[in-house]
Image (tube, rainbow, N blue to C red):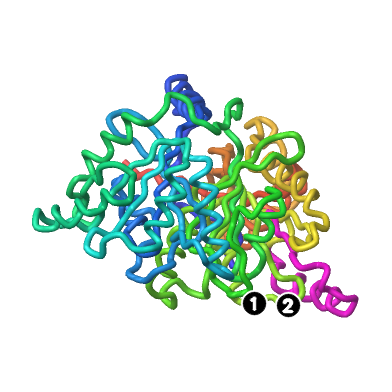
Amino acid sequence: MSDGLETAGDGVWTDEAEWSDTALAELAGEAAAEAVPLPTVAIVGRPNVGKSTLVNRILGRREAVVEDVPGVTRDRISYEANWAGRRFLVQDTGGWEPDAKGMAQSVAQQAEVAMRTADVIVVVVDARVGATTTDEAVARTLRRSKAPVILVANKVDDERLESEAATLWSLGLGEPLTVSATHGRGTGDLLDVILEKLPETPREGTGGIGGPRRVALVGKPNVGKSSLLNKLTGENRSVVDNVAGTTVDPVDSLVELGGRVWKFVDTAGLRKRVNQANGHEFYASLRTKGAIEAAEVAIVLIDASQPLTEQDLRVLSMVVESGRAVVIAYNKWDLVDEDRRLQLEKEIDRELVQLPWAQRVNISAHTGRAVQKLVPAIETALESWDKRVSTGRLNNWLKEVMAATPPPLRGGKLPRVLFATQAGTRPPTFVLFSTGFLEAGYRRFLERRLREEFGFEGSPVRVNVRVREKRAKK
């Protein structure tokens, strides 16, 4: 596993002066823009009619997981889109079926919630197949909707299918707009119609929420990420099933905990290696990596009732290397007996010896045990992630440490650190300007002493070394 330290001598130093007033103003403007509630467009329909492909076409990038198999999308997932200068959310949903059972029923319920809460509903039908009994059932439900409904006849790749799409008038949802999500045909006209029907303010906005901190729930498959999100939100926000790999797309939820609003992201379970996954699992792994990069803090769930696995360590390593703040949640604690607790402590001492700084919480997503303790752990980790140490204080501390424990000799010479400064936060990154190379073991020693002096619980710390180049003799 990574120790969170960068290799010495090859980093690019970013001076604090580069953070100009203009740059800070731009960041403040971006944060204010993110706080504005956006109207939502829900994309619904029966399985495998091309909803996720249409979502990607609207976004102009590949975000939603797509595979030529029904049932890949299972949760309702929101993405931010922009058309003609207007920002809005596009909500992808799983296939809706009226008489679904088991997991398919949970998927259908997520689609129904999207239909109830969206500002505009886009119902997608496969024009090549025509109106099926499921399409008719969807239409009957949508005819009672208070939100505007747009009927889309998808997979109309050329003019020869235009006449077949006209038969969809029978659904009673108005004129069908013909598009080809795969090739982009007609999607510009569809977006124009969507903008005409979008209200100025959303039906169910998140008014008053200013920049919620972003928390990613990550871990191996079937470790309880979706169950935890459902427990935190108090609703079935994510589809949960005993089958590993139920979640394939990141699922966003705004959750109020500890008197403030957080943005939680449920992610797909990460396999041992991305190249071992195939089809939608491969793209789900890529989405999970993107969700970690977009988050500020990651809650890494570990099944406390089972021995630590290579997958657990790989997930932790990925989060640390990404530079996110870390909280380790040992889930399924209600299944842990005294013998397992002793064994778990030994595994932690052996396998997680390089992560003594990570915040740890023992929880049960199923029963709700101690989930409220996640909030102070998250807040501590984020406070460390944002922490900055003044240059004067840092150099006074470093002078004392190096006087008491100087670095090892290199080439018969003793390297001297001329100056140290904190280059940035998120994560805290320090740069040491030295006359010679500092061994990796000594850099780890400095990181350990740095944590002892200044804290940084729950956040990785990066220590870069810049070696002064020798001046050429005249």
Kind of residue sitting beneath label 1: Thr
41 displayed left or right of 333: left
Work out which quarter of the rendered image holds the C terminus and state it: top left
Label 2 environment density (alpha carbons within 10 Å; few <14, some 14–19, many ≥20): few
Whether the magenta-drawn stretch holds residue 350 is answered as yes
CA distance for labels 2 and 1: 9 Å
318 displayed left or right of 306: left
22 displayed left or right of 333: left
Whether the magenta-drawn stretch holds residue 344 is answered as yes
Residue labelled with disc 1 = 309
Q: Secondary structure at mark 2?
A: loop
Kind of residue sitting beneath label 2: Gln
Residue 306 - label? 2
Image location (x, y in percent) of residue 290: 46, 54
- Residue 177 in view here: yes
Chief secondary structure of the magenta span?
Answer: helix
Q: Which residues are magenta?
A: 327-354
| Residue nearer the viewer, 94 or 115 | 115
| Residue nearer the viewer, 31 or 172 | 172
Q: Residue at x 57, y 42 (%)?
A: 426
Work out which quarter of the rendered image holds the N terminus and state it: bottom right
Image location (x, y in percent) of residue 398: 68, 42
Image location (x, y in percent) of residue 301: 67, 63
Residue 219 - label? none
| Residue nearer the viewer, 94 or 149 | 149
Q: Is residue 114 above or below residue 340?
A: above
Label 1 environment density (alpha carbons within 10 Å; few <14, some 14–19, many ≥20): some
Query: Marks 1 and 2: in contact by CB < 8 Å?
Result: yes
